[in-house]
Amino acid sequence: MIVGDRVAVFPAPGALREYIEVPAAHAVVVPETVPDTHASLMLINTITTREILRAANVPDRPAGSYPQIISAPASSVGRLLIWITHERGHKVIPVVRSTRVANTVRQHFPDLARCQAVWSHAACFCGC
């Protein structure tokens, strides 16, 4: 990364300005092929996921302490939550509302224990 590179930063004072100065560790270089509309959202899902895990104290719990139930697992944040909690050794139970979404979750995370549609009160549980 060099001065003048196109980067994404979040959060940073003055982030809505055209040009700002931030520590290099707070910036991610954005390739020219990525439109500004995508680059502006590039970090928000990761930061949202991190804050959810922090609020739930998931990083501080020993692996396998109890299952992590994740709603909307096919969303960007949901997929990040599954990946991070699964990597930390927690059992993950994605909760979806359709077989189509259950299949999407299975495609993204084939290593989850089991991912079968079990209908109960309009919800489908995968990985139980």
Image: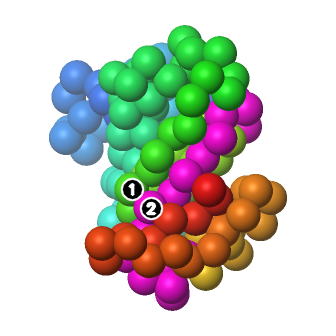
Tell me if I can see residue 8 in this picture: no
Tell me the number on the disc at residue 95. Answer: 2
Asked which secondary structure carries label 1, the reply is: strand
Q: Mark 2: give few (<14), some (14-19) or many (20+) Cα within 10 Å.
A: many
- Residues at marks 2 and 1 touching, judged by CB atoms closer than 8 Å: yes
Amino acid type, callout 2: Val
In this rendering, position of residue 107 left or right of residue 77: right
Amino acid type, callout 1: Ser
Name the spot of residue 96 as percent of width and height, x first.
Answer: 43, 69
**Which span is picked out in magenta?**
87-102
Asked which secondary structure carries label 2, the reply is: strand
Res. 1 image quadrant:
top right
Q: Nearer the viewer, residue 99 or 122?
A: 122
Tell me the number on the disc at residue 57. Answer: none
Q: For the point 44% across and 61% down, which residue is it?
A: 95
**Vertical arrangement, residue 59 with respect to residue 49, above or below:** above
First of labels 2, 1 by sequence position: 1
The CA distance from mark 2 to mark 1 is 5 Å
In this rendering, position of residue 127 left or right of residue 41: right
Q: For the point 36% across and 39% down, which residue is it?
A: 48
Q: Mark 1: give few (<14), some (14-19) or many (20+) Cα within 10 Å.
A: some
Q: Mark 1 sits on what residue?
A: 71
Tell me if I can see residue 125 in this picture: yes
Name the spot of residue 5 as percent of width and height, x first.
Answer: 54, 42
Q: Nearer the viewer, residue 14 or 47?
A: 47
| Magenta region includes residue 88 | yes
Q: Nearer the viewer, residue 20 or 25?
A: 25
In this rendering, position of residue 34 left or right of residue 103: left
Name the spot of residue 7 as percent of width and height, x first.
Answer: 48, 43
**Vertical arrangement, residue 128 with respect to residue 17, above or below:** below
| Magenta region includes residue 6 | no
Res. 22 image quadrant:
top left
